[in-house]
Amino acid sequence: MSSDKHLTVVALGGFGEIGLNMMALELGDSIIVVDAGLMFPEEDMFGIDAVIPDFTYLRERYQLIRALIVTHGHEDHIGAVPFFAQEFRVPIYGTTFTLALIREKLREHNLLNRTDLRTIKAEDVIEIGPFKVEPFRVCHSIPDGVGLIIHTPYGPIVHSGDFKLDHTPVDGKRLDVEKLSRATEGRTLLLLSDSTNVEREGYAPSENHIARTLAQIFSESSGRLIFAVFASNIHRIQQIVDIASLHGRKVLFHGKSIQSNVRMASELGYLNLTEAELISLKDLATVPDHQVVMITTGSQGEPMSALTRIAFGDHKWIKIKPGDTVVLSSKFIPGNERTIHNLINHLYRRGAEVIYEKIRDIHASGHAYREELKWLISMVKPRYFVPIHGEYRHLVMHRRIAISMGIPEDRCFIMEDGDTLIIGNGCARLGSKVPFGRIFLDGKGVGDIAGPVLRDRKHLAEDGLVIVSLVIDQEYGGILSGPDVFSRGFISEEMNPEILQAAQCLILELFDQYMEEGVKPEVGELQREIRKQLKKFFHKILGRRPVIYPVIAEV
Amino acid sequence: MSSDKHLTVVALGGFGEIGLNMMALELGDSIIVVDAGLMFPEEDMFGIDAVIPDFTYLRERYQLIRALIVTHGHEDHIGAVPFFAQEFRVPIYGTTFTLALIREKLREHNLLNRTDLRTIKAEDVIEIGPFKVEPFRVCHSIPDGVGLIIHTPYGPIVHSGDFKLDHTPVDGKRLDVEKLSRATEGRTLLLLSDSTNVEREGYAPSENHIARTLAQIFSESSGRLIFAVFASNIHRIQQIVDIASLHGRKVLFHGKSIQSNVRMASELGYLNLTEAELISLKDLATVPDHQVVMITTGSQGEPMSALTRIAFGDHKWIKIKPGDTVVLSSKFIPGNERTIHNLINHLYRRGAEVIYEKIRDIHASGHAYREELKWLISMVKPRYFVPIHGEYRHLVMHRRIAISMGIPEDRCFIMEDGDTLIIGNGCARLGSKVPFGRIFLDGKGVGDIAGPVLRDRKHLAEDGLVIVSLVIDQEYGGILSGPDVFSRGFISEEMNPEILQAAQCLILELFDQYMEEGVKPEVGELQREIRKQLKKFFHKILGRRPVIYPVIAEV
């Protein structure tokens, strides 16, 4: 599929879904991988903790892989790094803050010592095999994000990373337009660009835009203030901390992930806490309410988060009281709405004021809106265009924008996971598919759960389970014990004992029938027949189809 | 709790949740019930089809119930009517279109003939026991909705129903301000008002507001047009049909619920099809694409809907082709986002253009926004105020609005399901709680599934199931058959056969131990011990906690 004469772009994740971002560039005997992200499970992935990309394509070409380059430290870009590092011992490149986050992960997986982490800086040009990689600074909802200019013999490729244009970023570090301009010289071979917010018209508001609302909230509140943010949103934290200092409030960072991120960010110079007066949980009781601001996580209603425990009254130290104001300063991730609504209801029930995106302007997205996406296309003038980071509809809309800006249709490609784009001299086309897929993480298991197991979980979830236990005489086929019928998640046995009793009778009748016919039933047939009879019976009387498990022993 | 000297408002459903709307008014020996709605299941209600209110309070007072009055025909107001009618043989009052929808439901439940349905008209005053009930017309996303003015010896109560102010409704029928004004004479005892959209500032756009977007969509499209709407949104259907006639498109109503609603609405004069040229599915192939508009349901991505089948390529007659435009003309109900996104992605994948609320102005809510809620309070000047139809946060916000408009705090009540409000001469207070709750419908079962069954389903869904089968000798305790270990939804047994084998060995070791100690284990203890050992083992090697079901027979 690839040869010395071609450059191949390989879509491994995030092409057709939000999350799971991973792609590879293959040229001759060299492969570089960009990002290794995870995806949070969808509703029907029962019991799954997270999803990572299938590495089969990389596994089959291990010797060719020169490096993994990571654009920024969000989970959908670094969440699969430990699983990658476990398998592929190649250098991992990232900026300072990104590597700090990766280091934490590798430490947890006992992989830190054996992994070759290499810091990239804004001014670096890294040579990796036939590629020269120049990072360029972007604005995003995490510090130290970069896009990549990847120089190839066919011309430069621009990978946007996750980006927005922010003319007034909190840290003053704007997207590095100069570098983008100089490095591409307006003749980009290929633009790979973030499609997350392609549905939104206009420009994303600056992170700075919400400062006014934050200040208002501080002015209005006379009780304790509790902010829930994403732990990696250091600029948001900076804004809250700064306003807190102005209002003479002391800051309590609560929760493991926020404390760890704040520590790292402030040690590395991404967060300035010099003005802040920090307190710890044990000081809380001694500080007057109007002098407290707590910053924590859990804005998505995560069940184990401090905020959820606070909302449900289960937190050991922090009890909500009237006068408290809780601010969910983040977006509602689709799929989490009901959980978040539930969280808000509980906070209100305990007397808190709750402020969230729907009712107040307290979140700014980190992803470019439609006009910004157009800006990037104008800026780098790509010969070929591939939208990345999006569900199928996002990719289609983003491709249309590129076409509307004058890039010929046959040079704008929709790539889905597993697709390859083969770029030669003056031409590009989709090549054959490579292995791809989603690997499920559940507990300590990586990839040991696949479709059939999930289908079983779904069936069990929706209809419950009936177990029939029966011991029969090996020689004559008579019943030695049972039939006993139990259920789980099917009906309330106390309320309706007669249903399982009737099922029992049905099985006995079945045996009577065999007796009459003088047949000794074989175990397999008996299982099939019991399943069939009970299925029909339960459906008739209850309209339900539980999983039926006949356990038949012969002694 | 109630006496001749008091009027009692009883919250039975929808006070603290969206859906499940039901309340009662009790005075002396008379009770009237307002609405009997259902709620669609939340994510963690595995396998549940719908939820209805617990009727225990009504059951205990059957002889006092004089009537059920229904404000409009949405499921969250009439979905529980068949279950109510099954149990309580009292008159059911509703407007013409509302009763037409109820009639369909009762027919399905074989209850139509035995139920006393009474049509109410805008000019009616209905005397029911000590109550005089005057309906007043409201605007909503279904025809023939009303609010209620309920005259009591203590003064009139206004129940808003589901309402919005719409100065340009499609059918020209505005909220009946004159009647509201005349009947209350500015001295309302109590206002019960719809809180659904209290989070939204300003005024809800008129249904008419989206006509422009609809017309644009017709102008832009040269292929087939497919609209997905709620089947009861007759005004939306009217608008689409009218624009279709203007553009020379023929109309295909596709799907059972939409056909049934369209037939009823047009027979009863709520939908005017005289200008429309209707076609049926079999005509579809003979009509040029640019002359077709299909109206169907399925805008929430319901798995069995025609639209989902179309999107997934499973529809027998309708295949999406490039040039088709699909318009989801309804809101994304929270909790359905991912399913809807998935639907949109599939439609795009098949080449359709898809238009939805997020990217175009093609839905107008049927519920009043904040300024309209204020308008109603101004209008009826209630002595007491109770927000209805909302989650807890909605109720709190709505109550605050009432307070901000000058109603004293101690006259604005948050009622949750089961709460009672006791109104006497010149005073009102929350009384003691009555029985309340959620009854789950699953298949044909009504209320036979409760919390523990759902918890089991959740556990099975997340961690799967392990069954251990064992036959032991009744006399000596030795193993006669097994241990056999099976699983469902736990691990892939083909990929990891060694895990269940190891579990088997653990059980055998357990028996060896009993042997050594010369103990014959009792079945209950054996079950506990097997559960304990396997739980520990699975958690250690996989980090998972499946449901473990030891089936042990003694022979």
Image (spheres, coloured by chain):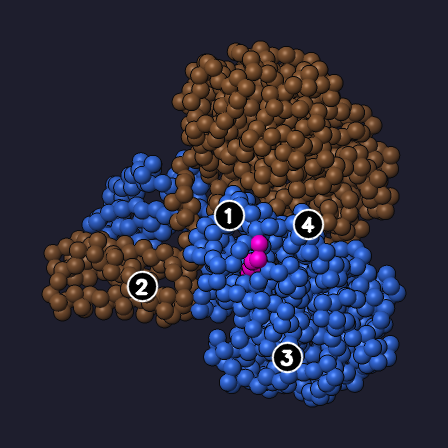
Chain colours: A brown, B blue
Q: Which residues are magenta?
A: B290-297
In the displayed structure, would residue B189 be above or below residue B409?
A: below
Viewer-side residue, B46 vs B337: B337
Tell me the residue that label 4 is attached to: B360
Is label 4 in contact with label 1 (beta carbons under 8 Å)?
Answer: no
Instruction: For mark 1, name the chain.
Output: B
Alpha carbon distance from label 1 to label 2: 44 Å
Q: Locate residue A218 relative to residue B251 in the image: left or right.
A: right
Residue under label 1, please give it.
B321
Q: Residue at x 50, y 81 (%)?
A: B111
Mark 3 or mark 4, which has the lower sequence index? Answer: 3
Q: Nearer the viewer, mark 2 or mark 3?
A: 3
Q: Choose mark 1 or mark 3, whichever is in front.
A: 1
Q: Residue placed at 28% from the left, 50% from the top?
A: B469
Residue B370 percent coordinates (x, y): 79, 59
Which of the labelled discs sits on residue B96, or is there none?
Answer: 3
Q: Secondary structure at mark 1?
A: loop
Label 3 residue SS: helix
Look at the image and tell me in which quarter the N terminus of chain B lies.
bottom right
Q: Residue at x 57, y 51 (%)?
A: B223
* Callout 2: chain: A
Amino acid carrying label 3: it is Thr
Crowding at mark 1 (Cα within 10 Å: few <14, some 14-19, many 20+): some
Compared with residue A536, is residue A230 higher up or lower down, i.e. above or below? Answer: above
